[in-house]
DNA sequence: GATGAATGAGTCTTCATTCAT
DNA sequence: AATGAATGAAGACTCATTCAT
């Protein structure tokens, strides 16, 4: 196997169109789910993506698999954001930057709105694990530097994002502003103020496993008991 | 027969049953909307309340009017909670107690999930105004005592509640715990730490009017604005 | 059993109220069915009669039996009208008077709108037979006098009434006028005119605009004109 | 390849099926509304057309828009009939032929049954205007020839049709006969008869028994086979 | 005997999914 | 591989009928 050919030889024609459709579909789904919520119709998503219904069902087995995929991609983008933020000089600054990115970025949502509707899948679990370790790593520095409360964990950050990304109607820009406002308010509460004593936070910090228990649909909660909910 | 008869002679039979149903329906609707979201079916709500579809439609003209009523009642309960909390000795304690109540009480939700779906109504506006002034009054003491950041307003508290009451699946008790956890975290961020300096919060504090713009459906946002009975 | 008491000793109290309700219910049903058609709700009829649902179902087994009764009563009133009209001096005048009465009277409808919905019953058959013979008798004189076409029968008159009483929306008075107009037009066609003079048609000819007023639902006539999403 | 391809290349497959469905749906709706009245369920109409519920709602936004379309098409067919009839040699014959066509044709109904239920629409207004002028033109000749009463207008003809097309249950052929019978009767009344001879009325006079066959619902037609339909 | 709340089957409408071209 | 028409199960809502007081 001497010389490998150009790794991805710039796909042409049909292939190229297909890839473009993939991306457009993903973006459209993300937007639609974020704006409207789980109740957006598949038709609406397909229309936003500019493709026909048939093409949609060629790529995804249905609405649920699509949303699962969106969820995975969102987590991956968030993971990437955490890694990028880790390059900041200051440990606290890295944390702040990550959270600001996560709260502002239009395409890096956790789609908490869907929480409880979708069951967990292997792909979600893997993406989740990667996100977990990325955030954990992000927390190490500020924690060891003593600027972050010891009882704040990685799952706290995720849950916080879930709360902050609650769908609220309004102009996108204004909503972004408000999210940043409350993010900073909460970050203040997470910080170890050097001089002032802090009351202990009520219950134990959730761990990663519990997050899954919280936002994956439990088997007995299923809407349609025999519904197939696989990937793609 | 000297005294007057009991003014409201404790209704009996059907009448009594009707009243009980009223309450059960309200509670059921609140729960169902909180847990499942706007997409709960009316059938589901009626089932939870233990009444038939017809009885539901005897009391409310539809799903929307029901949700409006739930919204109003929720606000009124919240208003009442604010008044009760105001009796606390300490200003800060009063604020904390109110927020804890609001976040924990099973029946005092703002139902932010419905935000943007329902249009405003006179009754909502009035309940909203009452809630506003009750919270405003609650903020006076801690603000003048200097334990509350000056740039925190009444609308901030409401939006915070909206965020904290984001629908999250899980055991009710555990969810309550987590909400309290993040509530305290944020309250820490709202407090004026006497010694340490605070970074300014990003954007201006939202005022009450803006809240309505955020969570009432605007007329032009209607799904099908001018639907009439035209051709085809 | 020596002397029988006054045959109908002017019923009192409950009994009297019941009779009054009977009449009110009959009138209300007649009106409602005439105005709205078969689709009027039983609730609406009961409301117009000012009685509760229970009282309605005490008297009639349901909507269908009620309509049957209304139908029978209508036929009886029509039969009576035919007998009264027979007293006219002129045979042709008697016929005309009967038809005018039948077309105008608010309570003597054949309720053709219900035609085809209700099955026959013995009571209907009997009332029908009586009406038949009354009309037959009414036709004898003009027929023998040679002013009525020989090939016109009693059933023709009834079918004509059915056609003329087609439910048409509009002001009651205007509708009455139009019915008389077409009645006279048709009577002309039924007459054996030895000479050719013609009586003028009663009301002015409707113009095209009026047709729309008649059969288009006017915006302000909407069943629920301003239905919006209010409280309860 | 000199010539241009077939402008409308006779659509194939799904496209073709869709067109066929359009026509079938229109016919089915017409029939169902004529026979049953406004209360026919959409399900029934779809079933008659041999299509699913969804396909129905793909084409029309609901029952009302469908009926509006049917109404417009009916008027257009009627207009066309008036234009065709105008080619008759004799002015009176043209009028008679038009009315006979209008009363007999299975697809050219004014659907008076729907009158008052549907609001006007631009399309209805336009179709209406065209029908108006077509009938007006049809009346010119007989009126100027002095064989038509001067006080008969175009709207009279339409209202007459409305009356004559009153829904009456029975065998289609028999109903057609009866309609023609009363049409001719009325036409006699519309004619200026200088001499007094009269044409014989077409079909034999219906007898009393037949009336019942016409307007009583037949047992096998019952909506709910076991429905009790007794007196009181 | 009167009342009106409760019931649930039926109607209109939507939307996720399939399938023939 | 793309398209969009067809499908039918499910949801919101109505109304004839029953029943407990």
Image (cartoon, coloured by chain):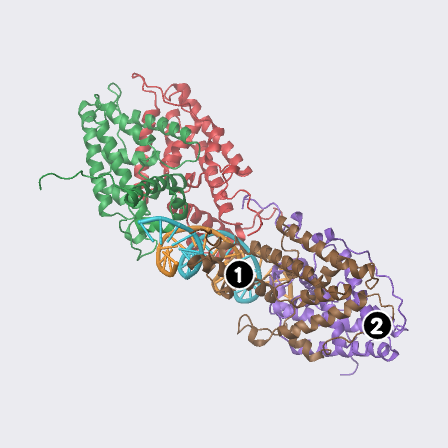
Chain colours: A green, B red, C purple, D brown, E orange, F cyan
Q: Chain of mark 2?
A: C
For the point 58% across and 55% down, the residue is D69
Q: Secondary structure at mark 1?
A: helix
Where is residue B64? Give x, y as percent.
49, 46
* Image-based side of D57 in relation to C211, left or right: left
> Which is more toward the observer, F10 or D28?
D28
Q: Residue A78: where, in percent of width, then height? A: 26, 34
Horizontal side of A162 relative to D95 (left or right) equals left
* Residue annotated with mark 1: D23
Label 1 Cα crowd, 10 Å radius (few <14 / some 14-19 / many 20+) = few
Which-is-in-front pick, marks 1 and 2?
1
Q: Is residue B198 left or right of residue C159?
A: left
Q: Quadrant of the rendered structure where residue B123 is?
A: top right
Instruction: Examine the image and state in which quarter residue B146 appears.
Output: top left
Q: Nearer the viewer, residue D36 or D159?
A: D159
Residue at numbered disc 2: C191
Task: Decide: is A49 above or below D5.
Answer: above
């Amino acid at each position: 196997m001497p010389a490998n050919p150009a790794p991805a030889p710039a796909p042409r024609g049909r292939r190229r169109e297909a890839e473009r459709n993939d991306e457009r579909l993903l973006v459209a789904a993300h937007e639609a789910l974020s704006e409207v919520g789980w109740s957006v119709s598949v038709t609406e998503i397909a229309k936003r993506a500019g493709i026909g219904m048939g093409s949609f069902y060629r790529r995804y087995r249905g609405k649920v698999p699509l949303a699962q995929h969106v969820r995975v991609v969102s987590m991956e983008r968030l993971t990437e954001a955490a890694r990028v933020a880790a390059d900041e000089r200051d440990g606290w600054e890295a944390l702040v930057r990550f959270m600001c990115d996560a709260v502002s970025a239009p395409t890096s949502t956790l789609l908490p709105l869907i929480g409880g509707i979708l069951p967990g899948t292997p792909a979600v679990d893997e993406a989740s694990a990667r996100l977990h370790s990325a955030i954990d790593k992000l927390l190490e520095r500020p924690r060891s530097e003593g600027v972050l409360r010891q009882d704040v964990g990685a799952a706290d950050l995720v849950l916080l994002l879930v709360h902050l990304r609650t769908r609220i109607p309004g102009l996108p820009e204004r909503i972004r502003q408000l999210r940043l406002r409350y993010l900073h308010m909460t970050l203040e509460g997470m910080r170890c103020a050097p001089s002032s004593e802090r009351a202990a936070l009520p219950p134990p910090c959730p761990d990663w496993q519990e997050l899954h228990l919280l936002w994956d649909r439990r088997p007995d909660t299923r809407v349609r008991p025999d519904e197939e909910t696989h990937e793609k």
